[in-house]
Amino acid sequence: MLLLIGSFLLLMLIGTPVAVSMAVSSLLYLVLYGVAPDIIAAQRMIAGVESFPLIAVPFFILAGNLMNSAGVTGRIYHFALSLVGWMKGGLAQVNIIGSVVFSGMSGTALADAAGIGTIEIKAMKDHGYPVEAAVGVTAASATLGPIFPPSLPFVIYGMMANASIGALFMAGIIPGIVMTVLMMLTVYVFARRKGWGSDTPFELKQLMSASLEVVIVFSFPAAVYLLVLAGLSVNLAVLIGLVALVALDWYFDFSAVMALMTPVLLIGGMTMGWFTPTEAAVAAVMWSMFLGLVRYRTMTFKTLAKASFDTIETTASVLFIVTAASIFAWLLTVSQAAQLFSDFIFGLTDNWWTFLILVNVLLLIVGAFLDTIAAISILVPILMPVAARYGIDPVHLGLIVTLNLMIGLLTPPVGMVLFVLARISKMSVERTTLAILPWMIPLFIALMLITFIPAISLWLPTQMGLIR
């Protein structure tokens, strides 16, 4: 066990990529101890990526890339500006609302930061906000991407923990709302202290227009339900509703109704059994292509090809990490590391609160050094048996793991969102880190609430019968 973990940490310290570090340390362990034939190791690595839930990975990545290339991010920004731009710290509030909407399409923090975050930082700088404030609120709001459904980390976690991905998606809704409210309150406090005003005049017409878009989107499920009560089949009712919605959007040219419909269609489709959470990723891609090629006509075949190649590159790196992590996690089990860790933790305390505090500390440290996918792949097989002994629900643990690792994306030395925002804002990594620190406060408050009040995560999936 010491050889396996020690060689992995040593390779990481000298700058070896995380996937290569896991693969080399695993092969070194196999060669020296001969715990399994080479062919078994190869089979374990292949089995790590030969999984139906993993099919969702490239499609969710592609959906986010298509939304960016189709110009949907600009429409989301203008919708959020109409809805909350008149508040104190208007563009900071717009930043948060825009991220909430975009999170229902991309499922990743990086896509959020690199996509709509680029527009939001430029707009805030142009309106006189300090660049540090623009970067800080963008970083904090980017963490919403993997919490609201759909979520790429939830897909990986569900596969590793053998947990329901649909339940994880539903479990993220209320925590996402809690995080949004806390971030908006933080912006209000900063606005009062620093004298930030509104960035657009209060216009009742614009506010009513944006509010109408929200009402239309949330009225869609109710309208479908009424049509079903009137005797129509569910499929026909949804088809009629979609046709009516497209016609309304085309006639009135709403800024973001069709974009806002993305999470509604995905969640509704999963709830009604039209597709599994994995197949929902394909539905997200189809909807993105419809918006880009048909509705908004902003996507060309050139941009479609670029989005596809970007997806191939990102997917290859993700699956390489999963492949290496699968053999590494298996060897941790073979070497009894998981059992030893379980016994050690259980020997320290029999209180689940104390255990979750230790888990949070561990994940915050690991998240600062490891990629999200790698951290989930390595730690979840170790943490799951311990959590089961404390009676902690896997779905609840999934929210805790994901939020901790999202915070890790904002911290050096390997926080990817940190590096993306440093590049966008043209600031040094050190200055970007200092800019993000004050905006960690709402994230840590949300983390404590989600950790110690399980009902925040579990109430909705329980009510929907996804977990017991």
Image (tube, helix red, strand yellow):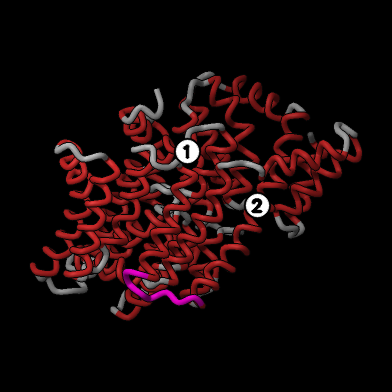
- Left or right of 133: which side holds 210? left
Where are the magenta residues, as a range? Answer: 294-301
The amino acid marked with disc number 2 is Leu
Residue projecting furthest to the bottom:
126
Along the line of sight, the residue nearer the viewer: 242 or 324: 242
The amino acid marked with disc number 1 is Ile
Q: Quadrant of the C terminus?
A: top left
Queried whether the magenta region covers residue 297, the answer comes back as yes
Label 2 sits on residue: 319
Alpha carbon of mark 1 to alpha carbon of mark 2: how far? 18 Å
- Left or right of 318: which side holds 101? left
Please provide percent x and percent y for residue 460. 32, 33
Q: Residues within 10 Å of mark 1 (few under 14, many from 20)?
A: many
Q: Residue at x 32, y 61 (%)?
A: 259
Examine the image and state in which quarter residue 40 appears: top right
Residue 449 visible in image:
no
Along the line of sight, the residue nearer the viewer: 390 or 211: 211
Along the line of sight, the residue nearer the viewer: 303 or 325: 303
SS majority, magenta: loop
Element type where label 2 sits in the image:
helix
Please provide percent x and percent y for residue 56. 53, 49
Q: Residue at x 11, y 63 (%)?
A: 208
Label 1 sits on residue: 165
